[in-house]
Image (cartoon, rainbow, N blue to C red):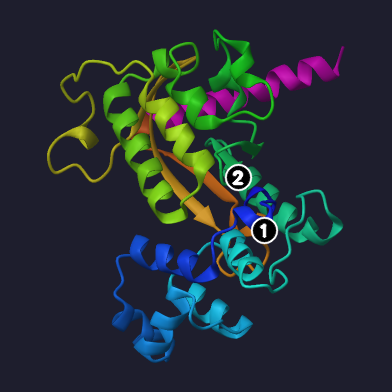
Amino acid sequence: MASLSRSPSSVPPVGALLRGWRQRRRRSQLDLALDAEVSQRHLSFIESGRAAPSREMVLRLAEQLEVPLRERNALLLAAGYAPAFAERPLDDPAMKPARQAVELILKAHMPHPALAVDRHWRLVAANAAIAPLLAGVEDQALLAPPVNVLRLSLHPRGLAPRIANLGEWRAHVLERLRRQVAASADAALAALLVELAALPAPETAAPSHPGLEPGGVAVPLLFDGPNGRLALLSTTTVFGTPVEVTLSELAIEAFYPADAETAARLRTLESEAGRQSAARSNL
């Protein structure tokens, strides 16, 4: 847990950390105090270091500020308390139900592509529909674990040359990442944003799909797959009530066909993959 490994001398006081989260959420002291059912005077004393918050108060303020679970643990440590939320690797026996849920979602999404990522957009798992889309990646180092799916998608030696609407998709990815950095204050995500923003940006072209026209409902990913262009809409799924750090940071990115042609091409890719698998098993 990188956010919990700092030495005591390097950790700002809990009051300063809480003030930083409040300002990041654009909340006034009065507004936060009312929602947390505490006096503004007491909140001011906590932020200035004149009062030490109880464990319950730290957690109450963190909940009102929607602080990520990892950083709630950091707040507790800064206040002198033990972390409240466990952090386990995905292969821990206690995480088996969560792993099974992820695998079930990914498998049920076939023949459409879907993958699971951690808080830094590193690939955790993917369904079989992802593999054909990765064929032909020029820089194989981009596919070496841990694979960062945002770097892979926007890198000029990754998938970027096969994204027909790279300008629009790049803008969507970077804006989403900016929002994540603002919400999480995660230094690694901030560094990733700087890295990706520095990658070559294509010239803006005319919209090449109805979804990109004014009035379109969503920005699709236009991807030149092995059997033709795929127009894909993306959705994100997270666990609704996590009380464990790793699980709270896990997200499933699922892609759906934006038109009938894409749906047909994805079914064809699944059939071809099935035939190839059967042929290999008969050898």
* Crowd around label 1: few <14 · some 14–19 · many ≥20 (10 Å): few
At 59% across and 53% down in the image, what residue appears? 249
Q: Is residue 66 visible?
A: no
Mark 2 neighbour class, 10 Å CA radius: few under 14, some 14 to 19, many 20 or more:
some
Q: Position of residue 142 (x, y in %)?
A: 59, 19
**In the image: residue 62, left or right of residue 207:** right
Up/down of 185 relative to 260, above or below: below
Q: Which residue is mark 1?
A: 8
Q: Quadrant of residue 190?
A: top left
Q: Residue at x 41, y 62 (%)?
A: 20
Label 2 or label 1, whichever comes before in sequence order: 1
What amino acid does circle 1 point to?
A: Pro
Q: Main secondary structure of the magenta part?
A: helix
Q: Type of residue at label 2?
A: Asp
**Left or right of 74, for residue 236:** left
| Alpha carbon distance from label 2 to label 1 | 27 Å
Q: Which residues are magenta?
A: 262-283
Closer mark to the observer between disc 2 and disc 1: 1
In this view of the protein, which residue sits in the foreground, 98 or 266?
98
- Residue 44 in the image, given as x and y percentages of width and height: 39, 81
Q: Is residue 171 visible?
A: yes
Indicate whether 14 appears above or below 1: below
Q: Mark 2 highlights which residue?
A: 118
* Label number found at residue 99: none
Above or below 252: residue 31: below
Residue at position x 77%, y 21% in the image: 278
Mark 1 element type: helix
Residue 249, magenta (yes or no): no
Q: Does 275 lie within the magenta span?
A: yes
